[in-house]
Amino acid sequence: MKKNYLHSALLIFLLALCARGAEDSIEGHWQGALVRDGAVQVIMVDFFKDAGALKARIKTPDLVTAEPPPVPAGFESGKVQFETAYGKATLTLDPAMGEMRGTVGEMTPPVLIHLKRAFKPFEIPILSEEVQFRNRDVTLSGTIVMPATPGPHPAVVWIHGRGKAARGGFRGFARLLAERGIASLIYDKRGVGKSTGDHDKSGMYDFAGDALAALEFLAMRPEIDRKQIGIHGTSAGGWVAAIVAGRTKIPLAFIITNVGPADSVRDQQVHVAEYSMRQSGINFTPEEYAAAAAHMNLVEDFAYTGKGWEALSASTVRAKQTRWGRFVDLPESENYEDIVWVRLNQYDPGPDLKKITVPFLALYGGSDYVVPPEENVKKLERYLTEAGNRDFKIVVFEGADHGLTIQSQLRRMGGERADQYYWLWRKRAPGAVETTIDWLLRHVNVKRAS
C-alpha cells in the first residue's frame, strides 16, 4: 500500500513537472488549421528562440512554395500571440494537453485557429551551400540547394521578376525540387540582400548578365550536370530568360517561365491599365478604354524618347478627373518610378523568343492583369512555332492572379442557397506546382540514390 502511494505521488510530481515545463515553453512544432465558416486551411507553426526572442515560423501547405521569414511571437500567462497573413493570432494554451486555440484578426465571420503539439514531419535530407559568383564588378550572393545524394544533378537557375527580390522567395520551390533529385541556384538580385551593385540603376540586360554568370558558375560545379541546366524566370524574369537564352555559352536544357510576358515592355505597360480596368467591376465605355490607352501611350512615348512631357502633363491633369484615372500612371515628374523603369528596360522579347528551340514551359494566371494571358499566350505560341520549337507547353490556370495564386474568396457550389457557398482560403493555383514538377521530371534525367 505504501509502495503504491509512493508510485502515485511520483507520478503526480512528474506530471506536474511536465505541465510546468509545457507552460513555461511553447517551443517546438505545432500543427493545426485556420477555420472560417467551416472551411479549413492547414498550417504548421514552429516556435523557437532566436537571440533570446521567441519567434514563430508559419508554413501553409496550400501555398506550397512559400517559405516566409519568422515573425515575433509572444507567450505570457497562458496566452500566445503572433502575426499571420490574416491578422494577429491570439490563442489560449492548454499546457497539459499540448493544445492551443483562439482567433485571428477581426474578420466576419471570424477566423478560428487550433494548434496541437506534434512530431515534426520527416524531411528528405537536402544540402544547402552559401555561394558567391561575379558578373564583372558585381558580386552575387546565393544558395545552392541540392539533393543529399551523389551527383551530378540536373539544375535550375532561378531568375527574379521586377523589384528588389531576395533568394528567399524561391527557397520553398528549390527544396521541393531537391527532394526530387534536382538542384537549384537561388540568389539575391544585385543591390539586394548580400549581393552588391545598384539595383535601381540596373536594367534587364544587367540582370540577364547576372543570370548568365549564374549559369557559368553552376556549370563548373562537380555536383551539377552541365548538360542538364535550365532557367526559370518569373514575371519580368521571363523577359530576362529570353535574353539569356540567346546569349548563353552554356546550352540550356529547358526554360520555364511563370507569368512571363511575350509582350514588349511598352505593350505590357499599356495592357496593365486596360486589364486592371476590366477587372475593376466598373462598366467602362469603349471611349474610356480608348482614352486610358491613349494616355498610357503618352507615358510610354516619353519613357522611350524623353520627348512630349508637356502633352503627358496635360493628359495627367485630365486623367485625374476621370473614372479610369486611378488605373493608369499619373507621373508628377520626369523621374516618375515607372518612367525610369521603362527607360531602363526597353525590350521586345519577340526576336529572342523566335530563336528558342529548347523545351519550354510557360504558366499564366487566368485573372492576371499584369501579364494578361489574352495578350501573351497566342503571341508566345506564334513566336515559338516560328522558331521551329516542337517541345513547348503553355498552361493557363483559371482564376489565378499574377502570383499564380487564388485569393481568398466566397465560392459558390451549385445553386444560390447560402449553404451552397463556402469560404476558399488563399492558395496556390491548383495544379500549378504539379504541372511544373511533372514537366521538369520528364525533361531531365535524375540520378537515383543507389
Image: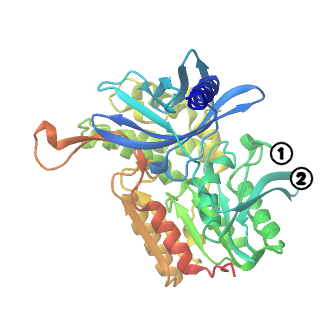
Front-most of residues 293 and 415: 415
Point 45% across, 47% down: residue = 270
Determine whether label 2 and label 1 are within 8 Å by CB. Answer: yes
Horizontal arrangement in the rendering, residue 87 relative to residue 22 (left or right): left
2 or 1: mark nearer the eye: 1
Residue 5, above or below 430 = above
Point 60% across, 53% down: residue = 172
| Residue 73, picture quadrant | top right
Q: Quadrant of the C terminus?
A: bottom right
Image x and y of residue 434, in percent: 46, 65
Instruction: Tell me the CA gap for discs 2 and 1.
Output: 9 Å
| Residue 82, picture quadrant | top right
Q: Which residue does the numbered mark 1 point to in the structure image?
A: 196
Would residue 305 be visible to someone looking at this image?
no
Q: Few, some or many C-alpha atoms within 10 Å of disc 1 (few <14, some 14-19, many ≥20)?
A: some
Front-most of residues 29 and 56: 29
Q: Which residue does the numbered mark 2 point to in the structure image?
A: 137
Image x and y of residue 46, in percent: 60, 39
Front-most of residues 413 and 267: 413
Horizontal arrangement in the rendering, residue 433 relative to residue 213 (left or right): left
Circle 2 SS class: loop
Circle 1 SS class: loop
Q: Quadrant of the N terminus?
A: top right
